[in-house]
Image: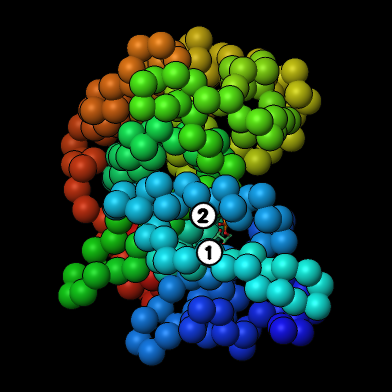
Amino acid sequence: MIRAVTIKDLVGVDIRGYHLNRLIGTGSYGAVYEASSGSERIAVKASIRSSDVLNEAVALQRLFYCEFTPKYFFHEETPTQNGILHTIGQELLGADLESIRQRVPWHAIKRPTLVRIAWQAISCLQAVHSYNLVHRDVKLGNFAVSLPTSPNHRVTIKIFDLGLAHHYKDDDGNLIDDSTNPKFNVMKYCSFEVAMGCEPMPKDDLHQLSYAILYASGYDFLQKMKSPPDELIAWKREMLREPSKTLPPLARFLTPWFEALSELNDIVPIDYENLKQKIQQSLPAHNASADLYMEMLDGEPTLV
Ligand SMILES: Nc1ncnc2c1ncn2[C@@H]1O[C@H](COP(=O)(O)OP(=O)(O)O)[C@@H](O)[C@H]1O
Ligand SMILES: [Mg+2]
């Protein structure tokens, strides 16, 4: 029996032979630890919300062969003094993109890096959608770089936190209802159509990604999200209707991509390759499909 007081006090505990070494992240309902067994290092996500953990475990198992999401190791239920502790063992990733944004000067990721991130993030969503899953919680904090591979420290972008993911259609293309009926329209960073009451669909993941990229470009999206609800919805609508005029000047170079995003709907299959080409067109002098690296610059690990 584990005698931990809270979900954030699990350092030293062993789960499935993995020793929890260090707290690496916390969310509203859980905590993520770096854990090891011999020389193997993994991430263990612990939560008190069993429904989200179960949902995430099912989604990660479905994505087992996907290279754009963390590898799934196990799901465990451990009795504790305070009830059942739910944990998921998964591939250990590096820094999440929100932490990376916070570390760069002016909180603005440089354009050549930004377009590479956008390119790979589109690939992440393309992969998740190809498993008939919709992520529904797309934001910088839910993308991370992989652990750098030696010797050149190359990294790839992966999407994680599938606690709100939904298996939205079967293999015949019939839509599957979400019986838990979550309220996505109250999520500040939801897409325009979701704010209007529609169920989140793959195109809405991409619209959320466009906000995340805007935020990573240096735009104060947190401030925008504080505007009155009507104003925020109007801004999201204008972003679809007239992106070239609505985008902040520093992000206007992304207009081709935002225009392509505004044409997406739930009926025509999404052309992900076209969306990636629009990213490339936004910054023609740089190769948006080039690899990303974690380099030491001024003593700080920096994504380039
Ligand atoms: N597989 C992982 N490897 C490394 N860090 C992770 C991993 N999963 C989550 N984290 C860290 O923990 C934080 C919270 O995890 P997340 O899965 O997003 O949970 P929540 O549902 O609470 O948002 C993330 O922002 C990230 O910093
Ligand atoms: Mg998260």
Q: Position of residue 125 (x, y in %)?
A: 38, 37
**Of residues 216 and 146, which is closer to you in this image?**
146
On the rendered image, what quadrant is the C terminus found in? bottom left
On the rendered image, what quadrant is the N terminus found in? bottom right
- In the image, is 218 to the left or to the right of 192? left
At label 2, counting other C-alpha atoms closer than 10 Å, the crowd grade (few under 14, some 14-19, many 20 or more) is many
Q: Secondary structure at mark 2?
A: helix
Q: Residue at x 50, y 38 (%)?
A: 135
- Please report contact status of discs 1 and 2: CB closer than 8 Å, yes or no: yes
Mark 2 residue type: Ala
Q: Secondary structure at mark 1?
A: strand
Judge whether residue 70 can be spotted in this image: yes
At label 1, counting other C-alpha atoms closer than 10 Å, the crowd grade (few under 14, some 14-19, many 20 or more) is many
Q: Position of residue 59 (x, y in %)?
A: 47, 47
> By what rule are the colours in the image chosen?
rainbow
Judge whether residue 93 can be spotted in this image: no
Label at residue 46? none
**Of residues 138 and 164, which is closer to you in this image?**
164
Q: CA distance from mark 1 to mark 2?
A: 6 Å
Q: What is the tally of numbered marks visible in this picture?
A: 2
Mark 1 residue type: His
Q: Would you place residue 202 above or below residue 162 in this image?
A: above
- In the image, is 185 to the left or to the right of 265? right
Q: Would you place residue 45 above or below residue 4 in this image?
A: above
Q: Which residue position holds label 1? A: 75
Q: Position of residue 214 (x, y in %)?
A: 49, 36
Q: Position of residue 231 (x, y in %)?
A: 72, 20
Q: Residue at x 38, y 70 (%)?
A: 301
Q: Which residue position holds label 2? A: 57
